[in-house]
Amino acid sequence: MSTATMLIYCPDEKGIILSVTNYISANNGNIVDLDQHVDSEQKIFFMRVEWTLSDFNVPRENIGTHFGSEVAQKYQMQYTVHFRDEKIRMALMVSKMDHCFNDILSRYKSGEWNVEIPLIISNHPEMEETANRFGIPYHYIPVSKQTKVEQEKKQLQLLSDNKIEFVVLARYMQILSENFIKDYSNPIINIHHSFLPAFPGAKPYHSAHERGVKIIGATSHYVTKDLDAGPIIEQSTANISHKDRVEDLVRKGRDIEKVVLSRAIWYHVNRRILSYGNRTIIFD
Amino acid sequence: MSTATMLIYCPDEKGIILSVTNYISANNGNIVDLDQHVDSEQKIFFMRVEWTLSDFNVPRENIGTHFGSEVAQKYQMQYTVHFRDEKIRMALMVSKMDHCFNDILSRYKSGEWNVEIPLIISNHPEMEETANRFGIPYHYIPVSKQTKVEQEKKQLQLLSDNKIEFVVLARYMQILSENFIKDYSNPIINIHHSFLPAFPGAKPYHSAHERGVKIIGATSHYVTKDLDAGPIIEQSTANISHKDRVEDLVRKGRDIEKVVLSRAIWYHVNRRILSYGNRTIIFD
Amino acid sequence: MSTATMLIYCPDEKGIILSVTNYISANNGNIVDLDQHVDSEQKIFFMRVEWTLSDFNVPRENIGTHFGSEVAQKYQMQYTVHFRDEKIRMALMVSKMDHCFNDILSRYKSGEWNVEIPLIISNHPEMEETANRFGIPYHYIPVSKQTKVEQEKKQLQLLSDNKIEFVVLARYMQILSENFIKDYSNPIINIHHSFLPAFPGAKPYHSAHERGVKIIGATSHYVTKDLDAGPIIEQSTANISHKDRVEDLVRKGRDIEKVVLSRAIWYHVNRRILSYGNRTIIFD
Amino acid sequence: MSTATMLIYCPDEKGIILSVTNYISANNGNIVDLDQHVDSEQKIFFMRVEWTLSDFNVPRENIGTHFGSEVAQKYQMQYTVHFRDEKIRMALMVSKMDHCFNDILSRYKSGEWNVEIPLIISNHPEMEETANRFGIPYHYIPVSKQTKVEQEKKQLQLLSDNKIEFVVLARYMQILSENFIKDYSNPIINIHHSFLPAFPGAKPYHSAHERGVKIIGATSHYVTKDLDAGPIIEQSTANISHKDRVEDLVRKGRDIEKVVLSRAIWYHVNRRILSYGNRTIIFD
């Protein structure tokens, strides 16, 4: 069953839900899911609505503009339209640590997400073999201080050539330059191995051990130009104790990282995230 | 700001959300919260909607019947209407264990819930002193096998005289008779000290210890005639280890029980629960 | 650095710790880890002690008997001796679901556990390809009611030929016969997709959905002749809501299953489990 | 059954466990609990050992010095001796928020901890009534910038007069001066309403909301002169969502704060904490 999903936000005012539901019903769509949220401080209205396409009067390629003139304009809505039967094109960027990488490829293969992974980019050669097994082109693009500008251009070209709709940094151990982030206009999801905002930057497990915390965590977030400061999608924590050395934190942390990153991907792929300011609305 | 909240369920079909939002808008209400759920297996539609009353055209005492004839009838809706500025009348039933009891009274006093507690019923005298401190009438009604029928009548009379809208069993160690449950038509919330359906009935911590589980839990649920088998509202668990003796489980369990019961009360008081069949929809 | 680990239990009495530590010190071992537990109800003493072998006076192959005559006999100890530098031989049994399988192989490859996996047994052919990729012999042994006795003999022969020290059922969807369990004298670890003792047997996610629980869980346990009733090693839970259909429980459950099973394997491989009666002591 | 508990740390070397257990056995004590930890980086040995006093040869008042000369000196041990049958004297400092305060008093009354609370100190008068109910002297000592030095002297005098062995800051909203912390040589336990090191200082729930985190937390720690930077005893987190306003975080956070603080008190009272450098060893 094919459906359309719309993610909407706009200044809050009376009658928005009515207008949207009215539009869908009037065009013979049947709403299968509707969730909304009002940020009452900032007076912003957020909505996710999904409806069946089978009898819908507006052809899918016209929905965007049609909804725009019929409804969105009136309320100054920002909105995007997505179709469940269209696979999203995702790229993976990895370095040497393979736990998130392996977990993602296993889920990919088992069809857990409605995505296509046309390429993997890495600054190390180690994971090429695994990529080959899954039949995914692997681009080894080493990055050094000197070559960064040039190499990022190659990366951006690859993302563009492959029409990548979002990038997942699966423990990619290079900081993307501001330029990269500006040039690549689609979302980039990162996994950071701490419960942000604690322990941003390098070696969070070492810092956690040093500080003597009793919980560790992981955070998936959209990448912005500010390191580890983008909108948070998902977080989780695990209990640790004084018995845990740094290497135990690394081991225990891997299990959280895998789950937190894969949940973020799931939300993103299922069009359940609205990012606004530095926050995310997760329609779960 | 006063609001009306409606909880609705009915067979799923096209146009329900539209009809409800239309009704509210047409009568000059502003929706402040809307959440819906479709049970796609059973084809049932569930909805919670809250709107402002300040400019609403229909007087609050007429909303029920007016909505009934205008909307509900058409869709065979079951629905209830509630008003945020009206305190709900809640009764507490307790025995000897005081952790949930104390926790509830502390929250009550601090105004965490929009409730009035006009009475406490107990089959033991121990907590009268605490009840007195909070200025709540305490009814000591001892129950034995022989006196159960008669004593339950007294209890029911008290609930009726005090117009009690829901009862909370805060570790009340008597099983209410089928008759009681049938006669008292309003909701009864219980806290059971296990993650149901594991370890129903008496002494769940002993059973948990005996079985050697690594987690314990607590479950709040609506009471039905089947012991510990009513619709579950909230559950939580905590990790334990082989070091924990039964008394440690009891100690650790108390902390879960308190939180799980108080969350259930919060959901209930805020009209966020729709109970259907043996399940609950929690609009959180 | 090579170490010996001893797991001990015996009737509790005075002086046991002293005797054990004395034995190790007297033979020039340095204790690097010691943990003990007393079941004060049953008056049983449990201990895990690990010490360095570099300067230890007793050759590793003699430690068992030497400790036996010097210490164990006096206290009627049950004990086992293990060496950290010796890889444990583990077999995997799988069916069609591959999430635990893939997760285990990824961890295996990355060296997370000190194990050797000389073979995989399955009643389905689907995972042979993956096994091949990891270079592990895959034995496809289909099982039907009629062939079960005979096929289990083959399985037992393989386990014996390969000197398998413990078996992991990674969502193996066949119930091992009482005979199998009796004949294979080494530990078998299973993952069950519920928080036991709730929902034993088949289709626990369906039962969980049916019952309307608000948490789901997973349990790893040693296999005994009683289905899903063996000593529990590890359990974990996750919150769910009314929005989750059975397929969502399956999806969310997979993430718990993977982690819970891998933790059980970690404990087992690191000789941190003492199983006694129907319970486990986990020296974490 | 009366027991002695010793908390010990010293440079790690061979034979420490043996010496301690030997000492206890030689003097006819029976070890009921022993736990040890080695910080292998810093080469420090930590131990908690508890033994029966009934037949112990050394009178309790002499154990400290006797053990000192017999064992501790040789290993340069830092150690403390405690007796389970001696109640610890605890003071409470509070301001206006009463959830931790009420929770602590309920647990105190139910005998959950082996403590005596001879006094409550507050910079506000609001909780005097509750203190009176529990029969605990309440000292209202308002603090302003101008009066802080003088008022802290009064507080210190009260703690000293009442032989207070540890202080609990149950959401006491004043920062204790460096002087206070230096002058009061016994432990002070604080509850901070965030998962430190994230969001130290004032208004952590506001900061958490602002940052858009998906989890909130609470941290209990020993107070040192560096604000919110002392050794962490216990932490816990709870999931939140975009729906939660600051006031929801406050409400949900209260439940974590209560549990985290009470667990810290439990560990402290049961002599299960060894604080070393800026970390704690929790013998649970």
Image (tube, coloured by chain):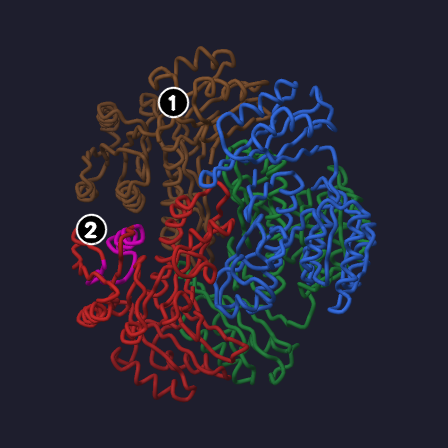
Chain colours: A blue, B brown, C green, D red
Q: Label for residue B55?
A: 1
Mark 1 belongs to which amino acid? Asp
Instruction: Name which residue lies at 57% across and 36% down.
Output: A9
Q: Quadrant of residue D187?
A: bottom left
Mark-to-mark CA distance, 1 and 2: 43 Å
Pinpoint residue A43: horizontal percent, then vertical percent: 48, 37
- Residue range of the region highlighted in magenta in the rendering: D99-123
Pinpoint residue A3: horizontal percent, then vertical percent: 68, 28
As helix, strand or loop, the secondary structure at mark 2 comes to: helix
CA neighbours of label 1 inside 10 A, class few (<14), some (14 to 19), many (20+): few
Mark 2 belongs to which amino acid? Thr
Above or below for B174 versus B181? below
Above or below for C34 versus A239? below
Looking at the image, is mark 1 or mark 2 nearer the viewer? Answer: 1
Above or below for A146 versus A215? below
Give the residue at mark 2.
Answer: D130
Above or below for B3 versus C279? above
As helix, strand or loop, the secondary structure at mark 1 comes to: loop
Left or right of C271? Residue C117 is right
Pinpoint residue B22: horizontal percent, then vertical percent: 50, 19
Q: Is residue C136 visible?
A: no
Left or right of C254? Residue A60 is right
Frontmost residue, A53 versus C284: A53
Q: Chain of mark 1?
A: B
